[in-house]
Amino acid sequence: MPMLDRRTFLTGTAGISFLSAFPRIALAGGHGDTLRVAIAGETGDLDLLQNVSTLSSYSAVFDALIHYGPGGALEPGLATAWMVADDGLSISFDLREGVTFSDGTAFDATAAEWNLKRWMGVADFSWIGIADAYEAIVIDAPNKITVKLKRPVPAALLELTIVRPVRFLSPKAAAGQPIGTGPWIVESYSSTETILVRNDAYWGEKPSFARMELKVVPDELARANALRAGELDVIGGDWVAQLSPRRAKALEGEGMTVVAEPGTATTILGFSPKSPMMQDKAVRDAIYLGIDRAAVAAVLFEGFADATVDIFPATVPTAGTRTPVPARDVAAAQAALTAGGWTGDGAGWTKDGKPLEIVFLVSEEAFPGSRRISEMIQGMLTEVGLKANIESVDLATMHDRRPKFDYDLTFFATYGAPYDPHGSLGASFVTASDTGPDGKIYVHPDLDALVATALETGGDAREGAMQAVYDWIRTNTAACPLVVVQRIWAVNPRVKGFSLPATDYDLPYKGITLG
């Protein structure tokens, strides 16, 4: 799946200006009418078909047919209405009339067809269900199209809300020109910043300020210092410019406004299905029972996380019934080992002459903060009598070892909204899917079948099919969910009306006024 390299950014881009191409640009002098937002990596040219740009900037420039709203609600975008046929084999869209791309090109059925055919039915995008099932597009009227499918795709509408490649580019755009229908126009981009100016011809609600500067600041401390100094207005967001809980606490104490809301991605301890030690359910049970999730959330995440044992948080659609988070139970963990044929106690365990000792693979580059979390978990497991040897590796090594299941225990994270639940289930829990360096959380033939059924089931039966997947994972202790990290942002006091977008793949600018 292309989104597996979401933290990979284009480097060395030369500065490119598009100002002369757009007559409807509102400019502002100084910073009074400019919102300055930190981004961790440069945007590049926002190519919708290539995985070379930061994902968070797309939604400012490009619209989708359908937009992802709070809690997964589907909201009109370039489509004002849609209808899925009873057999699920076609979806009709009424397109918004009177919309133009920022170069003046009309958005209509022909432009929509040109865009959709760039990725629907294309092998590189087969990880998107609607692309893999694509059969044809029919233009029914100047502002109406029907997408025909080879098979039903229950998550098709939700898939149309994702960041890339589903959004719409002007058919007349030259190579490398990011021209959309969205509220912002790219004036220029370089390796250090991207300048966006308001599209005063935008069909929807226009921003209250005229300019947005996306400043490339890879270092978190530098971002925080720039916010303190008034050189930045907004920092944060997991896929924009991550803000750690510890740094957020410090900024809050210094007068910055910190906004935190329940997250949509789950941090999970994954058991290697190819590890002889992890194939023993008693060992998986002991780890599951021996961890104090509430302590991890409170101590390591400064309270900016919620303990969980569910694969997906309630902020994700069809996330299943909620499971109460159990208290840490060392005695129960040890009892599970005893029942599984292990001999020993808090000092250590053996079975068939082998000691209970595992490899805990971590990478600060792949998962910032994982060393601290792993050390805390290591201490908890030591009290159970389970020896966890932490191996800290660089990103390249993690990318090499994780797909090979060359570990006993390691960290994973679900994709979050708008990709879940279908994105993480179809990638991280299915044997045949290609997940590249991200590897798999857990795979098993029985789980493959359950996930396939869940992803193919629509209507009233979908909830039950999804729940069957979650129940299997829980019954078999196939994964060890830990926490859902909250979505954390910090803003300068001059920013008023700040609120979080529905996903961290979106830039927060709606409703903001600048003091």
Image (spheres, rainbow, N blue to C red):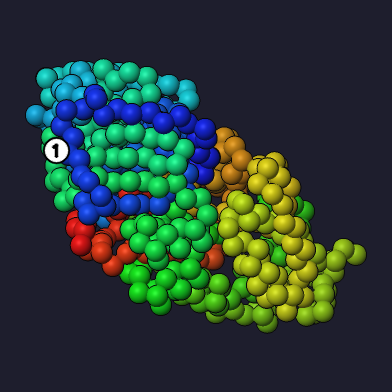
Residue 300 or residue 11, whichever sits in front: 11
Query: Is 76 rendered above or below residue 276?
Result: above
How far across and how far down the image is residue 216, in percent? 44, 46
How many numbered dots are placed on residues in this image?
Answer: 1
* Local secondary structure at mark 1: loop
Q: Which residue is rendered at x = 54% and y = 63% of the image?
A: 481
Query: Is 400 rendered above or below residue 144?
Result: below
How far across and how far down the image is residue 466, in percent? 41, 51
Judging by the rendered image, the residue that carries numbered circle 1 is 200
| Residue 261 seen in the current view | no
How dense is the environment of label 1, judged by Cα within 10 Å: few (below 14), some, or many (20 and up)?
Answer: some
Instruction: Write down the quadrant of residue 295 in the picture.
Output: bottom right
How far across and how far down the image is residue 371, in percent? 65, 63
Left/right placement of residue 198 relative to residue 396 reads left
How far across and how far down the image is residue 278, in percent? 71, 57
Left/right placement of residue 227 relative to residue 269 reads left
| Residue 383 seen in the current view | yes
Q: Amino acid at mark 1?
A: Asp
Q: Which residue is rendered at x = 63% and y = 56% of the image?
A: 364
Q: Which residue is rendered at x = 35% and y = 52% of the image?
A: 37
Left/right placement of residue 334 relative to residue 159 reads right
Residue 165 or residue 154, whichever sits in front: 165
Q: Which residue is rendered at x = 58% and y = 55% of the image?
A: 367
Toward the right, the furthest residue is 353
State the quadrant of the C terminus: bottom left
